[in-house]
Image: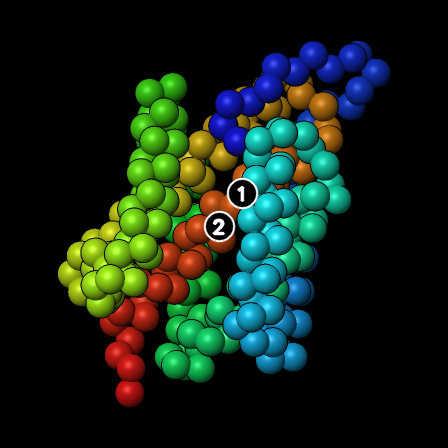
Amino acid sequence: MYNAPSYAPPTTTRTMTMDDVVMKGFIVLAVILASAGTAWYLGWGIGIGIGAALVALVLGLIVSFTQRPNPALVLGYALFEGVFLGVISSYFNARFPGIVLQAVLGTMMAFLGTLAVYSLKIFRPTPKFTKFVIGAAFAALGLILVNFIASFFVDGGLGLRSGGPLAIAFSVGMILLGCFFLLLDFDQINEGVRAGVPEKFSWLMAFGLALSLVWIYLEVLRLLSYFSGDD
């Protein structure tokens, strides 16, 4: 997502504007929210949620690795990701009433705070920073996989998701990593607008923002659950 392809738009192609990205971003988020609300309202079970998550993962990987701004794939990802979020959010809210609203507000604060940092030029991503963030993401996903495998042999695995101090620190780190990805998203959008990339690439930018926001939301939701107690 952050190794942008080389663009050579023909002179007749309309170039991407910030408004294009905002509009596509709202469309993608609307699809996510609509499908999430539907899944929650209909009370779909965890099996449907897992299936939807797997489909969203496949579609997300296709978009990420092909780097092609395909609206159908992006909206398909949003649809299935929304179903997963609706199922998992309903599950968490049933155990910890009100936690979903708190997680949504926390995600909004993280987005606005990161946007302010970028807009005020407090920090701008560098090539080294980009490599660090991508490397950290692979390392984090690797740790999650190892933790999952270890949980079959040791209760709680490595303790990354058990609710203890290590789990809290890991979730905080994952939230920060999600904010770092938002910084990369903002920078990629800004550079794309300045470079005059074709308008259709606004779908790819909106997809990147959605990925980062979903990442942050899930981690904020998990972090809040550690402090909510389980009566």
Let me know if residue 124 appears in the view.
no
Amino acid identity at mark 1: Leu
Spatial distance from mark 2 to mark 1, Cα to Cα? 6 Å
The front one of 155 and 49 is: 155
Q: Residue at point 33% right, 56% down?
A: 148
Amino acid identity at mark 2: Leu
* Farthest residue, direction front: 153
Crowd class of label 1 (few under 14; some 14 to 19; many from 20; radius 10 Å): many
Q: Residue at point 35% right, 64% down?
A: 222
Q: Which of the labelled discs sits on residue 213, or is there none?
A: 2
> Which quadrant of the view contains residue 200?
top right
Q: Residue at point 36% right, 37% down?
A: 138
Residue 223 point in image, percent of width and height: 31, 63
Crowd class of label 2 (few under 14; some 14 to 19; many from 20; radius 10 Å): many
Q: Residue at point 66% right, 72% down?
A: 38
> Which quadrant of the view contains residue 127?
top left
Answer with left or right where residue 208 lies relative to residue 167. right
The front one of 105 and 61 is: 61
Label 1 element class? helix
Q: Which of the labelled discs sits on residue 209, or is there none?
A: 1
Q: Which of the labelled discs sits on residue 34, or is there none?
A: none
Label 2 element class? helix
In this rendering, the answer to whether 227 lies above or below 176 is below
Cβ atoms at labels 2 and 1 below 8 Å apart: yes
In this rendering, the answer to whether 58 lies above or below 81 is above
Residue 84 point in image, percent of width and height: 56, 63
Residue 16 point in image, percent of width and height: 69, 27
